[in-house]
Each structure stands twice: as C-alpha cells, then as structure tokens.
Image (spheres, rainbow, N blue to C red):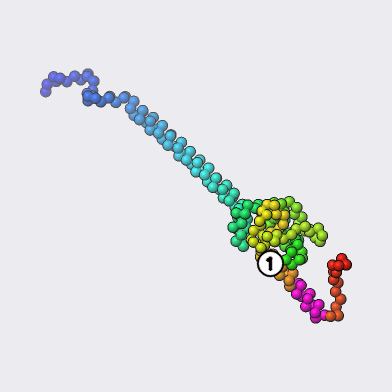
Amino acid sequence: MSSKGFNAGAAPFVPTGASPAPEDGGQQHGSVFGQQQALLNQHQSHGGHMQHHQQQQQSYGGYGGGGGGGYGGYGGYGGQQGTGMTLVAAGAAAPGVSIEMFDAEVKAQLSLPADSIFFTAGAAAGCQPGARGPAVKHKVCASFVAHGGCRLGEGCRDVHPLPMALDEARQRVYAWMAAKEEEFTTRPEATYKVFYSDLKE
C-alpha cells in the first residue's frame, strides 16, 4: 500500500466553510446550559413570588369585600351595600346588652338586644347601652323601617333595628296593651293609675 499523499503529522481535515470545534467545547456548552438553567430557576422563583403576592391580594380583597355586606347575614339585607352607609353592629362591642329606644309607631320604649341593632356612624357616637327612662335618646329610624333603607345615610342619628326583631318587640307591646284592656273591661272594681296629659300628672 502506498503512503503517497498521507501525512501523519498534518492537521485534521476541516470541511470548507466550517469552523473548527473549540478544544473546550464541552465546558462552554455546560456553562451556557447552566446559565440558561439559572435564568429559568430565577423566572420560576419570581413567578412563585408573584403568585404568592396575588394570593395575598385576593385574600386582602376578600376581607375588604366583606365590609359592604353588613346586612347579608341578617334576613337578606345584602343589597344595602349601595346606600353609602357605614353601619356599626352594637352587639359586636357589647354582647348580651339590651338597648332601649323610642318607637313612634307604638308610642312606647322598646328594649332590643344590641346585636339586633345597627347604628350609623353618627348614632354610634352617642350610643349609651343600658340607658333607662328619661335618659333614652335613641329613636327607631322610621325611614329605614318604611323603605328598607335610610335616606339620611351617614347623617342619620337614629338606630336601625332588624325588621324581624323590631316586629317581635312591637307584638309584645300590642299583646301587653290588649291584656291590660281586657283586664280593664273585665275587672271594674280594680283601681288603675293613669296619666292625665292636661294636668301633667
């Protein structure tokens, strides 16, 4: 076999137009791959932080959204969130306390549990739970009872009882009045103490 044209010490053959592969090609390839993997990890980590942040925002938004539905848990009054009123539940600060108020419909004082009464910001400022007799300054908001809302909004200084609780209190007054009227007609010999407005006594 002839060795003509064969040079053992010559450089390896490289096709025309091609670049020779670097001696450290494996190391460079690993370095580039490592950089890409690091960037991918950073992106995923950033995405995880963003997702956690969005979850926090959604959580805070859920707490904030609960403020408008103050009546939602009491007889379906969730629609009141459009009235612009900031309602304060008296029972939240004074559980188990009853509050007296004057009701113009029955012309008498009613005693209702504090957790069944909602005050506007103006009415809550002067709230004195447990007030009795002449010290009673609270009145049932007639506008709220008649229309299911308060046209005075934040400026209303009256209280807004839940309709169901107010109806029950009124029925007790009507029942008491009916019992007294029946007693008056069936016991003519009984002596009663009455108030005469002209004499103020």
Residue 41 rendering spot, x and y as whole percentages: 44, 37
Residue 165 rendering spot, x and y as whole percentages: 68, 64
Decide: is 189 above or below 35: below
Disc 1 marks which amino acid? Asp
Image quadrant occupied by the N terminus: top left
Magenta stretch, main secondary structure, is helix
Instruction: Answer with left or right where residue 190 lies relative to residue 31.
Output: right
Residue 126 rendering spot, x and y as whole percentages: 75, 52
Residue reaching furthest front?
Answer: 198
Residue drawn at x 12%, y 21% as measured from the top left = 2
Quadrant in the picture for residue 89 = bottom right
Residue drawn at x 22%, y 18% as measured from the top left = 9
Decide: is 127 above or below 28: below
Range of residues picked out in magenta? 176-187
Instruction: Answer with left or right where residue 70 lies relative to residue 13.
Output: right
Quadrant in the picture for residue 152 = bottom right
Q: Is residue 177 visible?
A: yes
Residue at the spot of label 1: 167
Quadrant in the picture for residue 7 = top left
Q: Is residue 95 visible?
A: no
Does residue 30 show up magenta in the picture?
no
Observer-nearest of 9 and 81 = 81
Residue drawn at x 38%, y 33% as measured from the top left = 33
Observer-nearest of 52 and 86 = 86
